[in-house]
Amino acid sequence: MEEVDDIIREFLAESAEGLDQLDRDLVRLEQTPADKELLGSVFRAIHTIKGTGGVLGFPRLETLAHAGENLLSRMRDGKLMLTAEIASALLALMDALRAMLRSIGDCGNEGANEYGDLISHLEWLLETAESEHVKQSTLPRRLGEMLIAKEAATPEAVDAALQAKAAGDPRKVGQILVSEGVTDAKTVVETLREQAECREDASSTGNLRVDVTLLDRVMNLVGELVLARNRILQYTGTQTDRGLLSTVQLLNFVTAELQEGVMKMRMQPIGNVWNKLPRLVRDVAVACGKRVRLDVEGSETELDKTIIEAIKAPLTHIVRNSIDHGIEMPEARAAAGKTEEGTISLRAFHEGGYVNIEIRDDGAGIDLTRVKAKALARGSVTPEQLARMTDREVLNLVFLPGLSTAEKVTNVSGRGVGMDVVKTNIEKIGGTLDLQTVGGEGTTLKIKIPLTLAIVPALMVSCAGERYAIPQVNLLELVRLNGDEGQEIELVHDAPVYRLRGNLLPIVYLDREFGHAEEQSSRATHIVVLQADGSAFGLVVDAICDTEEIVVKPLGDHLKSIPCFAGATIMGDGHVALILDVPGLARKASVMRDGSGAQQAAATTSVSKQGEQWLLFQAGSRARMAMPLSFVSRLEEFPADAIERSGDRPVVQYRGEILPLVPVAEALGGVEQRETGPAQVIVAHTGDSRAGLIVTRILDIVDDHVEVEASGSDRGLLGSAILQGRVTDLLDTHALLQTAGARCGSEGARA
């Protein structure tokens, strides 16, 4: 009985793989219906499933497969051409067979559905597509199929030989064909040899099926071995016995080799996921009335099987979105000067311990105006916040829950459920997303994910007496501030920052985030510079311990909701250390913008109940100037060599755009006091105008209620007011940006 169960399990596994291949082959066959080799492959696959199902006692599966086999047989014989209707029916047959196989695996039977309507439809297609009754033989045609494929015999001659053998002729099919003069003995012998070689290849492919549960258990045991190796290495650090050290060194080597070998066993090509997409593209395109081609590159790129499983659903959703939202209708593409057939391109490649996946469509791109309208309508952002967002931040609003740019809800999309889940699922496995779009040209989504989640290199740090592991893929560099240098961490708008090579680096104190009591100390300050979703920040810890390979252990269900931890690991001394979820920690500390950019936008545009917020700065000889913080998008520092010229005006390349620069002192009729080092720039905006205001120094951000006094003849100023008890000139930001924007625009037109 156990042997029969093994046979059925083998049948289910092989049939599932065969159906996946059939999905791909049928989509290809629809594009090249005259491909006899491909058609023969499809027929043989269905024939194998039908035959094996019948032998194992699954008559309904056999009957269903037989209906498809009849249709494919006539197409293989050249009596029938593949049409879109036949292709859809055959793909429905694949789904039905897959459902039956799933039921056999779960319940031991084929299920209650006999698929009578589908069988009738397949039979109707056969009857209406042929002008005469076609008699189908269900006898095995293995030699005959090979002779027909080689055009050494006709289908009619093979049918006649099979019928003669069924009527009692003791001769073999090959002998009958030779005696009838259909083919020669040499061809039959060569074909029989090829048949034997194929059987031998099928029985000795060099591959061995291993149960996934067993593979996971082996991986867990290797993880435990790695932990034991780490403990032994820790204890032998002070040993001098050469024999012991040599043995430990051998153990270390063997463990590393075993670990690498098991990791390779778990690796699978991403093509295992991509192979299911041609069918998806075909079905969704037909449902949407569009023509779409799928191009893939790098399908051999390998990932850990856990990662493979985790990205199946996100990739499927992204491709569906690309077809439904991105690719235009054929007539719209033609009107835009494009080919009527759209293209979705998938590309995968390894880079720096990550796998990069790019999904690109050549559609219309994402309409940012519609994204803004949808976000406002849902109340996801306020008009003030939206006015301060860059195009990139607006684009990332599509990752907000419930936001969809679809004009109507369809079976494909439009419910606003999906892209937020895609982002969440990718970030759960330590990945990041980067969305780019160009109006009229298309959209590209770049995904970066780690190769494996089982055993990863990590930096060990300590804080408040506890140890934590930081995955090295998030690590940029380490900074140590000795003694009083810790005072170099400054406060800007109550947020700690550190000037790292001229750039302001947001600082997060790990002890504060976890609610530990702060300790005042003159000891060195350790800053771990991390990267999360393209944003860098510094994490202050008590001490930096070491780097080592850690075995990732999942957290219990009651801890999974904690956003700052990605798992746990057992250290060499047997203690447990939590693994930090760097993106989750960054979001908790509000140093990384979420998908909408709303969190930071809200932080920078909040208005005090006591008065408005003002940015204080110095510009040339004017020691104190101010402008409403509501006009400020960002504070930046640009190195001197990054500033270029457009006509007679300075500009800088900023976030994919050309940002005009306005020296405030010169604009106010004074002389700019040039200082060495990077230029201090206030990225400001009003309405549709945006420019970078070059100032001498940023002073502070204050909350105060002001009463403006007229400035007289001073151009570029609203007037003056008393801020923090001192007279301060107020910049006319709107007028300055309007002038700068008009001049820059005219120069850009002349250029």
Image (spheres, rainbow, N blue to C red):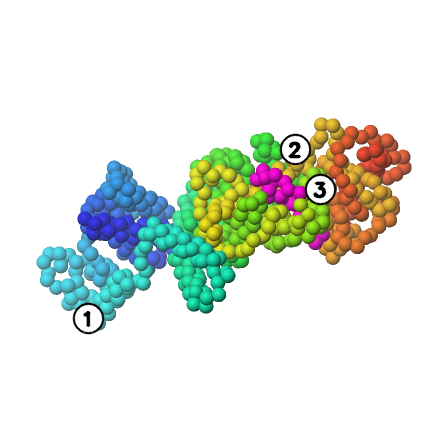
Is residue 396 located in the magenta-colored stretch of the structure? Answer: no
Task: Work out how far the residue at label 1 is from the one at label 2, CA to CA, in angstroms.
Answer: 84 Å
Which contiguous range is marked in magenta?
Answer: 500-520
Return the residue at label 1: 185
User: If you read the primary sequence from the N terminus, does the residue marked by circle 1 or circle 3 appear first?
Assistant: 1
Task: Work out how far the residue at label 3 is from the one at label 2, CA to CA, in angstroms.
Answer: 28 Å
Q: Position of residue 39 (x, y in %)?
A: 32, 56
**Residue sitting at x 20%, y 60%:** 158
Task: Report the front residue among 744 and 220.
Answer: 220
Return the residue at label 3: 491
Taking the image as drawn, is residue 426 in sight? Answer: no
The correct choice, above or below, for 677 with respect to 128 in the image is below
Q: Amino acid at mark 1?
A: Ala
Question: On the rendered structure, is 364 left or right of 11?
Answer: right
Return the residue at label 2: 383
Question: On the rendered structure, is 135 left or right of 563?
Answer: left
